[in-house]
Amino acid sequence: MILLKSPRELALMRQGGHILADVMALLRTSVQAGMTTQEIDEEVEAFIRKRGATPAFKGYRGFPATVCTSINEEVVHGIPSPHRRIKEGDIIGLDLGCIVEGYYADCALTLAIGEVPPRVQQLLDVTREGLELAIDECWPARRLSNVSHAVQRHVEAQGFGVVRAFVGHGIGRELHEDPQVPNFGDPGRGPQLKPGMVLAIEPMVTMGSWEVRILEDRWTAVTVDGSLAAHFEHTIAVTEHGPEVLTSKTGRSGRRAT
Ligand code: MG
């Protein structure tokens, strides 16, 4: 069942979302070669707690950290470690959420560390663009699978692969609510979007095959073919006036946010 959020509930999720927007801005400037993934995790946890929110992932189904840190062929759910140091030329996906008065917000971004080849930068750009095109579909009366299709069409047209094993989701009092939001599928299907729906849309895109496997730590998902993967995510409210990106201070994403 898809739960619609009241203005009061949306205000709390916006509060959490804006904390996450500030975290993402911090990460864009602070993450650099030589840091360990645990240092990133500690910095983000301290930031979220200082703002009076609670990290959403720590302890969630036993996940041990605040941020999922996924480097290169790792797609999602990498576990921060004091032994994992970021190197020049890596790409790193950072996925995190927070809770404000019982309400969740969720976001992710992928950063290139120093110089990366043009095709790798394109992987990041196309994944982010896919997310933005999906957000553009979040208007009342449109169908949910239009969101999914927007990602797949853009990503595959550029020769990249869309991960199937993980999908976006509704979000609110739970981190994962109905509906599931795949990043693939034909348009014109699924429920109609309504004001008050809140979706975490999160394309995961690879430079090769879409197939993934889980490592022995039982969390980290990697591409089966070892190709690089990128991940971007926003929490979006459907409103009468179109999409509001709760995890952006302007309510809008990417190119339209600046
Ligand atoms: Mg999510």
Image (cartoon, rainbow, N blue to C red):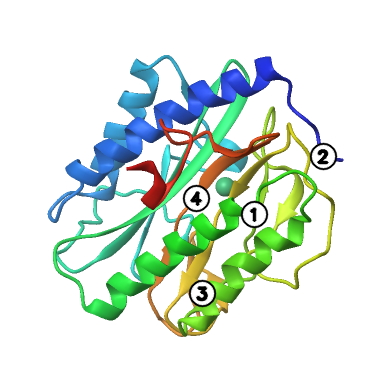
Q: Quadrant of residue 122?
A: bottom left
Above or below residue 107? Residue 147 is below
In the rendered image, residue 67, in percent from the top left (x then y), is placed at 41, 42
In this figure, what is the number of numbered marks?
4
Front position among marks 3 and 1: 1
User: Mark 2 Cα within 10 Å, few/some/many (few <14, many 20+)?
Assistant: some
- The answer to whether the residue bearing label 1 lies less than 8 angstroms from the nearest atom of ligand 1 is no
The residue closer to the viewer here, 221 or 250, is 250
Identified by mark 3, the residue type is: Val
Q: CA distance from mark 4 to mark 1?
A: 15 Å
Identify the amino acid type marked 2: Ile
Provide residue 202's location: percent of width, then percent of height: 55, 55
Mark 2 touches mark 4? (CB < 8 Å): no
- Residue 215 can be seen, yes or no: no
* Residue 199 pos. (x, y %): 65, 43
Residue hosting label 3: 155
- Which residue lies under the disc numbered 2? 2
The secondary structure type at the circle numbered 3 is: helix
Whether ligand 1 has any atom under 8 Å from the Cβ at mark 2 is answered as no
Question: Who comes first in sequence, dot 3 or dot 1?
Answer: 1
Residue type pointed to by label 4: Glu
User: Label 4 crowding class (10 Å Cα cut-off): few <14, some 14-19, many 20+?
Assistant: many
- From the image, tell me which residue sits under label 4: 233
Q: Which residue is located at x 18 percent, y 69 percent?
A: 89
Q: Nearer the viewer, mark 3 or mark 4?
A: 3
- 79 sits to left or right of 61: left
* Secondary structure type for disc 1: loop
For residue 222, above or below residue 80: below
Q: Which residue is mark 1?
A: 137
Quarter of the picture containing the C terminus is top left
Q: Secondary structure at mark 4?
A: loop
CA–CA distance in space, label 2 to label 1: 18 Å
